[in-house]
Image (cartoon, coloured by chain):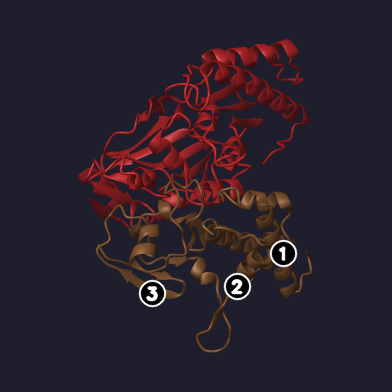
Amino acid sequence: MEFLSPSTWEEALAAKSAHPDAVPITGGTDVMVELNFDQHRPPALLDLTRVTELFEWEPDGSQLRLGAGVSYTTIIEKLGRHAPALAQASRSVASPQIRNRGSVGGNLGGASPAGDSHPPLLATDATIELASVRGTRHVPAREFYLGPRRTARQQDELIAAVLLPQPSGPQQFCKIGPRNAMVIAVTAFSLAFNTATREVGTGIGSAGPTPLRATEAEQFLAAEFDWDSGALSEEAIRRFGELVASAARPIDDVRGTADYRKHALSVIARRALGWSVSEYRKGEPQCV
Amino acid sequence: MRVTFEVNGEEVTADNVWAGESLLYVLRERLGLPGSKNACEQGECGSCTVYLDGSTACSCMIAAGQCEGRTVQTVEGLVEESGEGTDKQLGSVQEAFVEAGAVQCGFCTPGLLVQTDDLLSRTVRTGQEAPADTEIREALAGNLCRCTGYEKIIDAVRLAAEREAEKSGGGAA
């Protein structure tokens, strides 16, 4: 097994092109577990921790450009206003030690249906920036997830950054797990209001072969919600929960049954909506 | 491969390191620093917590090659010079754990000590108030202990915070 340690982004792309089988590693919180347990023996590790651009973030026009290696800790501490739902999701990741190292890029690279960052990326209509020696391309998060651990990333591509639209309305993230810390979601949900376009976005985690959107629920809510007064009936909130649950395609597994996941989703979707509506009426984002 | 980095203030070199080898393995098996414990090797238990370039991480989930040229501090690095030659004494956080009876089998202790040290670095040592219980619990959320029931551990963190606040003259505890 080789250990490749590029110090610039160009070198990293060249290395990935020359060794498409190389496994990129930054925080190591997924990759090292597989190595320690000998579940996977890749021909090479591609250490990206020396590529400084991956650990930077900057406002880029109407978006935040978040380097793929920026840690969850940094997102929590610095980016709550730029990316409220993603910051909330970051708070629910594992432990402080893991949040110091883990990143959204790693979550996207692993593409576990249970990754905490996926629902907010879907709900906020984020874009994934992929790069290779062939060039750079942008893939909407909504087209990125293809199957369990399968994504739109090509073998010679690296995940450079995530582009997050500036928030234009309340955003929420909810997660169900048996304890407060160190837990993989039994199911998770994210909701984002876009007051500029009068649309809503959703993201469902851990309840399908990939992270999912509840498009019917999104359309229903955008039409039912009174964008001027912030009014929404109890009946509409309940219906929204049902529509979110019906968009899920969960399985029974060690963390929960499919039925439980659907039920939990309808509950957390209603909660997220309730919080979002009261935040909308106040006109100020609360949890940043 | 050969990896050279700084551990507890000294430059060290490890030879014949396999590309997929963890920092934890290098510390324990190549550098003779068994303080960081190998328990779960999947980031669940926190027993192998160290500082890497100043922030805490599970050393089982760091590839050794990623440490080239970087700075690591382990639980061994928390001891303090006693002022007389090479003698060392327990650091204040370690002392508080002993006094509060927060040490039983000791497997989780090194990770808890490093994580507590980090919590105090971010709070009382910068003149802020002693951490509330909720902050203590959050800081230690990634460290499992199977024998103490955590109450004495939390007592120990409170005690360490109190002492350090006094030392730094804040009296914030």
Q: Which of B49 and A74 lies nearest the eye of the viewer? A: B49
Q: Which of B28 and A147 lies nearest the eye of the viewer? A: B28
Name the outermost residue toward the bottom. Answer: B85
Rounded to the nearest whole Å, what is the CA distance between mark 3 and mark 2?
Answer: 22 Å
User: Which numbered disc, 1 or 3, marks the residue that appears first in the sequence?
Assistant: 3
Rounded to the nearest whole Å, what is the CA distance between mark 1 and mark 2?
Answer: 13 Å
Q: In the figure, residue A240 lies in which quadrant?
A: top right
The colour of chain B is: brown
Rounded to the nearest whole Å, what is the CA distance between mark 1 and mark 3?
Answer: 33 Å
Residue labelled with disc 2 = B91
Q: In the figure, residue B162 lies in which quadrant?
A: bottom right
Residue type for callout 1: Leu
> Which type of secondary structure does the marked residue at label 1 adopt?
helix
Instruction: Name the mark nearer the viewer: 1 or 3.
Output: 1
Q: Residues within 10 Å of mark 3 (few under 14, many from 20)?
A: few
> Which type of secondary structure does the marked residue at label 2 adopt?
loop
Q: Which chain is rendered red in the image?
A: A
Q: Are marks 3 and 2 in contact (CB under 8 Å)?
A: no
> Which type of secondary structure does the marked residue at label 3 adopt?
strand
User: Which numbered disc, 3 or 2, marks the residue that appears first in the sequence?
Assistant: 3
Q: Are marks 1 and 3 in contact (CB under 8 Å)?
A: no
> Dot 2 falls on which chain?
B
